[in-house]
Image (cartoon, rainbow, N blue to C red):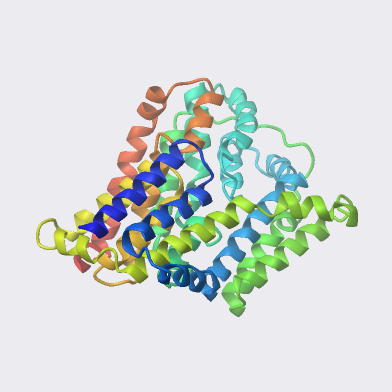
């Protein structure tokens, strides 16, 4: 019972800190401290923390997250992302495709509240198509998150793979059908009722230039997939390529600013906090009493699905929900394989995507001057169809039968 109280107290502290908009890394470390006070208030706990910090898994994960944050910063700071948007407008004559592609491209960048960056561009394209504010908000939100199901450089998926040890590319491949459903649903409900409008591109499409601008991300993934070079190395190569591509903008005098602004201390602290929380739960075997209570009383599948979804919904922050949820649910899983890890990740992701405290929703609704009720009425059919598609996929693949 004391262990259960410790877990509940840790989650309570985490929830309070997040609601007060306190940095997530500090919130995670504070929740870990509460866990230790309940589970192991002895000098041995200090040794636990020390060992967790020095584990290769922790160091590797922190480095990857910091590098991805740096790549996103360089794309934005150098204005290379804006150039990609302009190249897209030149290459794609249909404004409907452009208005969907803009948030999708920004979705590749790990930027909290990044929907606000793409919103002005969608506003401009949406005006050409005669869209209302709620339609623009839906498109900005839905297509921004389209990659999250399959993107190997997404922080949520990296955490899910890193914590469980399941190959990240296997998770991504398994999720492709759900990604396709998400895309089709977005096209139907987001773009289906919009009259097609062709615009006259300025200039000749330069697909090689578009490929050049995406080269850092493409190369990082290819080197990792084909040659099995660690992501830490390939992402470092991506940073170097980005700096080279923008060598006229950055010089030695910019080194201090790039280090200060390009390396996110908050992301680094968040990654450390997540690993400390995970490691503490594992070492204290804190979930053994929870499993004993639930065993035989509630179907395990229902417990896992509802818990995963609730964590995403309540936290409204994908790395947070994955970083907290998977360590909590891991001991309950009948087996840790690609299917089950993908399932847990998907239900956490769904809770996060529709969470009313999800920063992208809050900022998008505010920017386009609509309201939450109207936004959710617009989004409800899409969410319902996607959830049905998800359940069908897990039934077809036999994932549910593993419980």
- Residue, far left: 296
Please name the residue shown 9% across and 62% down the image.
296
Find residue 54 and report its image quarter: bottom right
In the rendered view, tell whether residue 166 sits above or below residue 394: below
Classify residue 187 as left or right of residue 103.
left
* Quarter the N terminus occupies: bottom left
**Could you say which is closer to the camera, residue 75 or residue 134?**
75
**Could you say which is closer to the camera, residue 251 or residue 270?**
270
Please name the residue shown 54% across and 75% down the image.
56
Please name the residue shown 32% across and 62% down the image.
39
Q: Position of residue 192 (x, y in %)?
A: 45, 34
In the rendered view, tell whether residue 65 sits above or below residue 359: below
Q: Number of numbered discs present? A: 0
Please name the residue shown 41% across and 35% down the image.
189
Classify residue 343 as left or right of residue 52.
left
Find residue 116 and report its image quarter: top right
**Could you say which is closer to the camera, residue 244 or residue 11?**
11
* Quarter the C terminus occupies: bottom left
Q: Position of residue 234 (x, y in %)?
A: 66, 70
Q: Position of residue 273 (x, y in %)?
A: 50, 58
Judge whether residue 322 can be spotted in this image.
Answer: no
Classify residue 401 as left or right of residue 96.
left
Classify residue 24 as left or right of residue 215.
left
**Could you say which is closer to the camera, residue 278 or residue 359?**
278
Q: Position of residue 390 (x, y in %)?
A: 31, 52
Judge whether residue 114 can be spotted in this image.
Answer: yes
């Amino acid at each position: 019972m004391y262990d259960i109280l410790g877990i509940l107290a840790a989650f309570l502290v985490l929830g309070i800190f997040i609601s007060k908009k306190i940095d997530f890394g500090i919130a995670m470390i504070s929740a870990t401290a509460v866990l230790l006070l309940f589970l192991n208030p002895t000098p041995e706990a200090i040794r636990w923390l020390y060992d967790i910090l020095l584990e290769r898994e922790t160091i590797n994960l922190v480095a990857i997250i910091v590098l991805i944050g740096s790549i996103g910063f360089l794309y934005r700071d150098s204005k290379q992302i804006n150039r990609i948007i302009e190249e897209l407008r030149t290459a794609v004559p249909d404004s409907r495709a452009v208005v969907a592609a803009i948030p999708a491209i920004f979705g590749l960048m790990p930027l909290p509240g990044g929907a606000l960056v793409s919103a002005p561009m969608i506003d401009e394209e949406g005006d050409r198509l005669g869209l209302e504010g709620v339609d623009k908000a839906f498109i900005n939100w839905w297509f921004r998150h389209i990659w999250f199901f399959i993107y190997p450089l997404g922080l949520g998926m990296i955490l899910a793979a890193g914590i469980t040890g399941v190959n990240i590319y296997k998770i991504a491949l398994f999720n492709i059908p759900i990604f396709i459903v998400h895309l089709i649903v977005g096209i139907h409900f987001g773009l289906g009722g919009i009259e097609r409008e062709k615009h006259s591109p300025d200039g000749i499409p330069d697909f090689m230039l578009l490929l050049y601008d995406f080269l850092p991300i493409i190369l990082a993934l290819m080197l990792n997939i084909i040659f099995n070079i660690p992501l830490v190395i390939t992402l470092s190569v991506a940073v170097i390529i980005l700096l080279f591509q923008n060598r006229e903008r950055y010089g030695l005098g910019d080194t201090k600013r790039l280090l200060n602004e390009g390396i996110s201390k908050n992301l680094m602290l968040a990654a450390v906090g997540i690993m400390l929380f995970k490691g503490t739960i594992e070492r204290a075997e804190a979930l053994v009493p929870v499993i004993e209570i639930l065993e035989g009383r509630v179907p395990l599948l229902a417990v896992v699905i509802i818990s995963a979804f609730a964590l995403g919904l309540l936290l409204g922050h994908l790395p947070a929900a994955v970083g907290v949820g998977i360590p909590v649910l891991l001991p309950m899983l009948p087996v840790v394989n690609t299917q089950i890890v993908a399932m847990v990740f998907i239900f956490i992701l769904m809770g996060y995507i529709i969470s009313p405290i999800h920063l992208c929703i809050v900022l998008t609704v505010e920017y386009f001057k609509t309201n939450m009720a109207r936004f959710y009425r617009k989004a409800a059919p899409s969410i319902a169809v996607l959830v049905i598609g998800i359940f069908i996929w897990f039934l077809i693949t036999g994932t549910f039968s593993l419980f």
